[in-house]
Structures are given as structure tokens and as C-alpha cells.
């Protein structure tokens, strides 16, 4: 075992210019690992944009092809044509970067190729699940034998498998044969590092003094924004001026707009679209309550972002949030599929500013436990268990 420097390829399902939880996690981990003296590259999926090789925040990023076979004869034939070139690209990345550890984040096609590379070269493999096996609206693992089988084999041969919560590890143990596994939580950047790329976001969010409910994330069914819209009439029956702001993009955007229209709430539900990190911070800081209404949630970086913003939090009473939030102390936990209960929790915060402030203050005090340097140190301990180190 060694605790020296490591050359690590962070092999992620998605990265800049795309935004989301795994993208932010890998980006910040790359920076923190570099600051701690490790050599880091990022390998990510080429989505057909042909971004090639770029430098993001001083970190080398390779966008690699990851075709997978489909069940149709045409799909199999196409895969046979493109797979050799894709595999060559991965081998060339290995030759150029010489990583000592392949660390897969959010196992998808990226994981299939990284696991094959690790198997054929005996390079140590680390797998970090971000809840992709439970939080995918499209049930990729239910539909794809290849993904199920490859993930099962990968977690069995990996040096270590990590996840942001015990809930994610439990699913990996139950359905994919994981033995062991460890929790490495998410983290959040400090407010000073966000910059001010959209000062107007603060102006817009604070121009109206009506009570504001904010939720941000991918606009997908699993994130439960429809549950929050559905609860809004009950909330407004007790807090008539309350309005809702939803930040993010996704396949449910039109459906949410139609739902608000059908409930007669189009004038008080604002769909903000995709937000930058500083815009998210501005929205959360200007809110009276931040709500995470997810049907399933592996961890929820929004929890930490709400605490950083100094805003009271309402979160799910299951999954990762239930392991992080202390109900009644630094947030309220509720089943978001229980509309009356969700409305009651939100109204309680809106109607009691003193209580909301106590929740927010307790949450802010928790932030010291969730920093990117701490996450990077946890991963570095995993790399040390591989017995490799950079010269």
C-alpha cells in the first residue's frame, strides 16, 4: 500500500459542456485531486459532438466514442463497423495518458469500455455509482443486458466501489452482487468560488416579495417536480401569495408547463430553464424554501446548495437525503408523493420565518463536513489500496 501520488483517469458518463450532478462532481474532484498532487485526466463520452481533446480548468479532457450494440440486426452490424475504431481510441488514450487507476463515475457506456480496458490491461478499476441504477427514468439497466452484466462484473472485480449514500450501495448489493462498498458523499463549492456570471439572476429573484418556493434539477419524472406543482394549490390555500420557480431542463419541461396551466397556476409557476452554478446559488439564496421533491434521490447536491444559500430545506424522507438531513434540525423530511404532507411541510416553513432561519443556520453549520478536498482525500485512500503510485 502507498499513500503517494497517483495518475488517475476519471472516466465519466458526462462532462463539460453538459451540466448536472455527475459533471459537477467529477469536475470538482479533478481539481481537488490535482491540488493534492495527483495527476488527473478526464475521459468522457463523445455524444456525437466530436469535441476531441480539450482542457477544462487546466485538466486534460478526452471525449471518447462509446458505441454499444443494440438488439436489432442493423444495430449489431453498425456496431461491428464502428467498434474497432472506438476501441482503438480508448487504447490510444491509455497509451497517451498512462493512468495507474481507472475511476468510473456513473456507470454507462463509459463503464463498459473502462471495465474492458481494465480487464485486458490489469489496470486497477474503481467504480463510483451516482444512483444511475435507480434514478434513470428510462430504466437503462432494466432494458440492457449488456449494462447489467458489465456492471455486475465490474463491481465484483473493482478494487473498491463507492457511492454517495448507503441507499445506492444497497441497490448495488441487491441487484448487482456488490460485496462491501463504501460511502463517499457529495460536496459543494464555497460561494466565493462561483463567480457572478449572471448578476441579473439575483435582481430577478428578489424583485418580488411574495413567498418563493424553489426547486432545481433535471426536469425528469424521477425528480418529482410534478409532485411539487400538484401540491401548490394546497400550499396557496394557506399562503395565497406563494409562487414556484423551477430551474433546469429536461424531457418534462412541456408537461410541467401544461400541468401548471391546467391547475390555473401558469402565472405563479416559472420555468427558468438551465441555470449556471451562480444562477442556481442566486435562486436558492433568494428563495424562502428550497424543495427537493424527488421520487428517488441518490444524494442530492441541492441539499448542500440550499444549506450554503442559507435557505430552509424540505427533502425526501428516503434515499440519500434521509441519510444526510436531520429531520426538524437542518431540514424537514417528507414523502413527496404524499401531497398533503408535502404541502404541510412547505407551509410550515413559509409561515414561520424564525423556524426557517433555525433550519437554515443548522444546515449551514453542516457544510464543513461536505468539502471537495475531503472527497478527494477519500478517493485517494481508495487509490492507495491499489498499490500504485506515480513516480
Image (cartoon, rainbow, N blue to C red):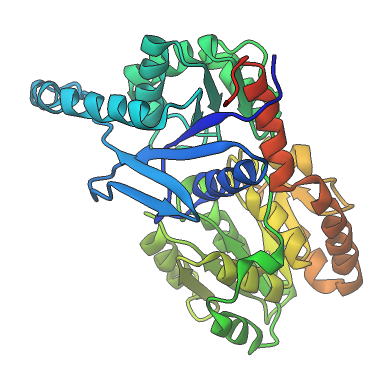
Rendered position, 63 above or below 314: above
Q: Residue at x 49, y 48 (%)?
A: 23
Q: Residue at x 83, y 56 (%)?
A: 363
In this rendering, position of residue 287 left or right of residue 203? right
Q: Position of residue 225 (x, y in %)?
A: 54, 56
Q: Residue at x 18, y 24 (%)?
A: 83
Which quadrant of the rendered structure holds the N terminus?
Answer: top right
Q: Position of residue 119 (x, y in %)?
A: 40, 11
In this rendering, position of residue 307 left or right of residue 177? right
Rendered position, 261 above or below 184: below
In this rendering, position of residue 20 left or right of residue 205? left
Decide which of 225, 311 is in the foreground and name it: 311
Decide which of 69, 359 is in the foreground and name it: 69
Q: Position of residue 134 (x, y in %)?
A: 52, 31
Based on the displayed image, in which of its 4 quarters is residue 189 positioned? Answer: bottom right
Residue 183 seen anywhere in this rendered image of the structure: no
Residue 111 seen anywhere in this rendered image of the structure: yes
Amino acid at each position: 500500500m502507498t499513500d503517494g501520488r497517483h495518475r488517475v483517469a476519471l472516466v465519466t458518463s458526462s462532462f463539460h459542456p453538459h451540466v448536472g450532478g455527475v459533471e459537477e462532481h467529477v469536475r470538482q474532484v479533478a481539481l481537488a485531486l490535482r491540488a493534492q498532487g495527483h495527476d488527473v485526466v478526464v475521459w468522457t463520452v463523445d455524444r456525437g459532438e466530436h469535441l476531441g481533446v480539450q482542457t477544462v480548468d487546466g485538466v486534460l479532457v478526452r471525449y471518447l466514442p462509446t458505441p454499444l450494440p443494440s438488439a436489432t440486426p442493423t444495430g449489431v452490424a453498425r456496431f461491428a463497423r464502428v467498434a474497432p475504431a472506438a476501441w482503438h481510441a480508448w487504447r490510444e488514450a491509455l497509451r497517451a495518458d498512462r493512468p495507474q487507476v481507472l475511476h468510473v463515475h456513473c456507470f454507462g457506456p463509459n463503464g463498459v469500455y473502462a471495465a474492458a480496458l481494465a480487464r485486458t490491461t490489469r489496470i486497477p478499476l474503481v467504480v463510483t455509482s451516482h444512483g444511475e441504477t435507480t434514478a434513470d427514468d428510462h430504466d437503462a439497466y432494466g432494458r440492457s443486458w449488456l449494462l447489467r452484466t458489465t456492471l455486475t462484473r465490474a463491481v465484483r472485480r473493482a478494487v473498491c466501489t463507492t457511492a454517495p449514500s448507503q441507499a445506492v450501495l444497497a441497490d448495488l448489493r441487491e441487484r448487482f452482487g456488490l460485496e462491501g462498498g463504501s460511502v463517499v458523499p457529495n460536496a459543494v463549492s464555497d460561494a466565493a468560488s462561483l463567480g457572478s456570471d449572471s448578476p441579473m439572476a439575483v435582481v430577478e429573484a428578489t424583485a418580488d416579495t411574495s413567498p418563493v418556493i424553489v426547486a432545481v434539477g433535471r426536469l425528469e419524472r424521477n425528480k418529482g417536480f410534478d409532485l411539487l406543482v400538484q401540491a401548490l394549490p394546497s400550499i396557496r390555500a394557506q399562503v395565497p401569495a406563494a409562487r414556484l420557480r423551477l430551474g433546469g431542463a429536461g424531457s418534462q419541461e412541456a408537461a410541467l408547463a401544461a400541468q401548471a396551466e391546467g391547475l390555473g397556476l401558469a402565472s405563479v409557476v416559472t420555468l427558468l430553464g438551465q441555470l449556471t452554478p451562480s444562477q442556481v446559488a442566486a435562486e436558492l439564496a433568494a428563495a424562502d424554501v428550497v424543495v427537493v421533491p424527488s421520487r428517488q434521490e441518490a444524494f442530492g447536491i441541492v441539499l448542500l446548495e440550499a444549506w450554503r444559500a442559507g435557505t430552509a430545506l424540505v427533502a425526501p424522507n428516503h434515499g440519500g437525503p434521509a441519510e444526510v438531513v436531520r429531520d426538524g434540525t437542518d431540514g424537514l423530511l417528507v414523502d413527496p408523493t404524499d401531497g398533503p404532507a408535502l404541502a404541510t411541510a412547505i407551509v410550515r416553513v413559509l409561515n414561520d420565518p424564525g423556524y426557517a432561519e433555525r433550519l437554515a443556520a443548522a444546515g449551514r453549520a453542516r457544510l464543513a463536513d461536505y468539502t471537495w478536498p475531503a472527497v478527494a482525500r477519500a478517493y485517494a485512500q481508495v487509490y492507495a489500496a491499489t498499490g500504485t503510485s506515480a513516480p
